[in-house]
Amino acid sequence: MYPVCATCRRIMKVEKNGVPFIERDGYGKEYRIWSSDQYKCPMCGYTVLAGFGTPTERFQPGFQARLHRIKRRREGVDYIEEQSPEEKEIMRTPIIFRAVEPDEQEE
Ligand SMILES: [Zn+2]
């Protein structure tokens, strides 16, 4: 079942597959990279990430390379940990990553 917009009561549609989501640890450091699907409400345009697969963890080979690639392309969504020591800095620059629009997909 797809996500449902609680406000509009509509089933959300998949807008993009494979959107990276960066999870951070309690110190604000990148910890896991998830691959998710971005859904959009057809009424209000609200978007959510769902359908997470198996993450790439920090200790695994290729993690840093993937992280750098995501940041360079600005193609993912970065989690903001409310209690993180980096919270103030993150909140000064709230949009670190943005979800990718469908027409921006790479070949
Ligand atoms: Zn909605």
Image (cartoon, rainbow, N blue to C red):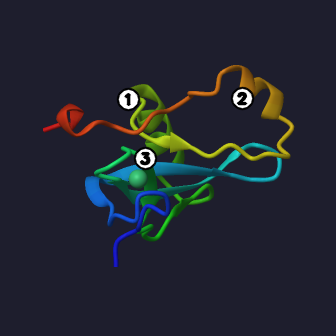
- Front one among 10 and 106: 10
Position of residue 102 in the picture relative to residue 34 (left or right): left
Where in the figure is residue 54, as x and y percent of width and height?
46, 70
Check the picture and name the quadrant holding the C terminus: top left
Asked if 28 appears above or below 104 in the picture, the reply is below
Q: Which part of the image, by quadrant, shows the N terminus?
A: bottom left
Disc 1: CA contacts within 10 A as few (<14), some (14-19) or many (>=20): few
Circle on res. 46: 3
Q: Distance of mark 3 from mark 2, alpha carbons?
A: 22 Å
**Direction left: furthest residue:** 107
- N-terminal of the pair, mark 3 or mark 2, is 3
At 56% from the left and 27% from the top, the residue drawn is: 95
Q: Which mark is residue 90?
A: 2
Quadrant for residue 92, please give it. Answer: top right
Query: Closer to the camera: disc 2 or disc 1?
Result: 2
Residue at disc 2, secondary structure: helix
For this orientation, the residue located farthest to the bottom is: 1
* Real-space Cα separation, disc 2 to disc 1, in angstroms: 19 Å
Asked whether 7 or 83 is in front, the reply is 7
